Image (cartoon, rainbow, N blue to C red):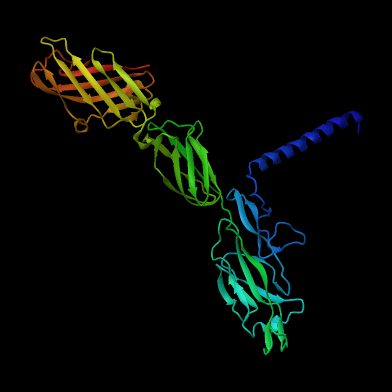
Amino acid sequence: MPARRRPLILLAVVVAVLAVLAGATVALAARPPIPSGGHQLSPGQVPAVCPAGATNVDSYGPTQGYYYDTEVDQWVGAPWCYPRWGNLEMSASQVTNAGSSVTFTAIPTDGSNSASFAPDTQSIAWDAAGAKIVAGCTNIDLTCTIVPAAKAGETWQWVMVHVAMPRTFFVDSPGSNCAGQHLCGGATTNAWAYAGVRPKRSTPAIIHGRVTDPDEAPMQGITVTATGASSKSALTDAAGRYELKVKRAGTYKVRASNGAGAFAPSPATVHAREGSPATQNFELKGCEGKKARAADVHSFHFTSGATGSMTYDDCSGEITLHWSHTTSCTPAATFSGTWTPKTSKWFRGYRGSDRSRILFATSPSIFSRQTAVTGGTSTTLKLVGGVIFPGSHRAILTVAAYAAGIPTCVTDSHGTPGYFDETLTEDQ
């Protein structure tokens, strides 16, 4: 190989190694540190007798450790090892599936005669707390068969099995502690093992959809969260779309939120299945807690001779209108009123606009009728309709007055007597 090419190859190797190390550093940095003083395990690591010379172990019972579970994204406690007291062992720890049984055997060692005499004297004590006993496990049994767990969980499940019995038996011993006894049990010894149950198999699934405002325009930056068999959150993109890759198939509660808007449905119940993406769309319906942000409230003033103001909440659709109009007829008449309509919706294509908001429905039952004075005569006003054009920052509304004696010179832009067409401009 030419000497001048070697530096380039070495440089490429160094860069590749650094990239791998950097990736590993990033991956490790994303993982929280192991709990203080914890011994790090691998998932499913089978507990055994503590190794000789190990530090920070318990001489009187099992010692715990931690493994990092990527399914739940956290450190999970699990048994690491247990001591060996002498004169007694138990068959090794075992791993099984949920609902299956495992059998443990107590084995007296080091010349102990407890295998012969402990059953006769009913001096065996088994403990497998939380497990279903299938066979044995009594004070005369050297074996114990259990079902450690009926159902698999999200993480490994470990059931501790403990057995205790005399280290050995003295037969017809003349000693003071056993005098007069044919069988005399010595000091108690202990042994431990574990039954592990594998977690349920991960079955990833996908929930996706779109978030829009009331006129079906996409909403970017909306947080969509799924909670259930696992949990996941994502932000919508410029097209209002989101995708949640949940770690397990199952039933989820899915919500959309931006901190101020109320979205429907809330929440949505979604059944996520493996291999079949579930679709759930959301639409902005109003303000959370019926409170609008300042940016959602728009103010308008009249520009066609009338006085007053109008505000509307772009989030909730709530509108308040204060209006007064004095005619130039003879005799002059003043009409005024205050309305708080409860309906509002987005509408496409009104008067050539791509996007407009219908402020008031035409149904008279929706609006309260207000009383005004016309030259000393009471009359009734009714809001007939209105529309706002956000792009051009203007609005149009129509008001009707019903009563005898209304000046015939009061007409709208179409020449209809008794109607007012008013134009409003948004305050900038």
* Quarter of image, res 360: top left
Q: Residue furthest front?
A: 176
* Quarter of image, res 426: top left
Which residue is rendered at x = 56% and y = 53% of the image? 203
Quadrant the N terminus occupies: top right
Looking at the image, is 283 positioned above or below residue 185? above
Residue 166 screen position, x and y as percent: 68, 78
Residue 280 screen position, x and y as percent: 45, 43
Looking at the image, is 72 positioned above or below residue 132? above
* Quarter of image, res 296: top left
Quadrant the C terminus occupies: top left
Q: Nearer the viewer, residue 261 or 116?
A: 116
Looking at the image, is 63 positioned above or below residue 73? below
Residue 154 screen position, x and y as percent: 56, 56
Residue 143 screen position, x and y as percent: 64, 77
Q: Nearer the viewer, residue 353 or 383?
A: 383
Q: Nearer the viewer, residue 352 or 217?
A: 217
Which residue is rendered at x = 32% and y = 23% of the image? 388
Query: Horizontal placement of 283 versus 159: left or right?
Result: left
Total tally of numbered discs in the picture = 0
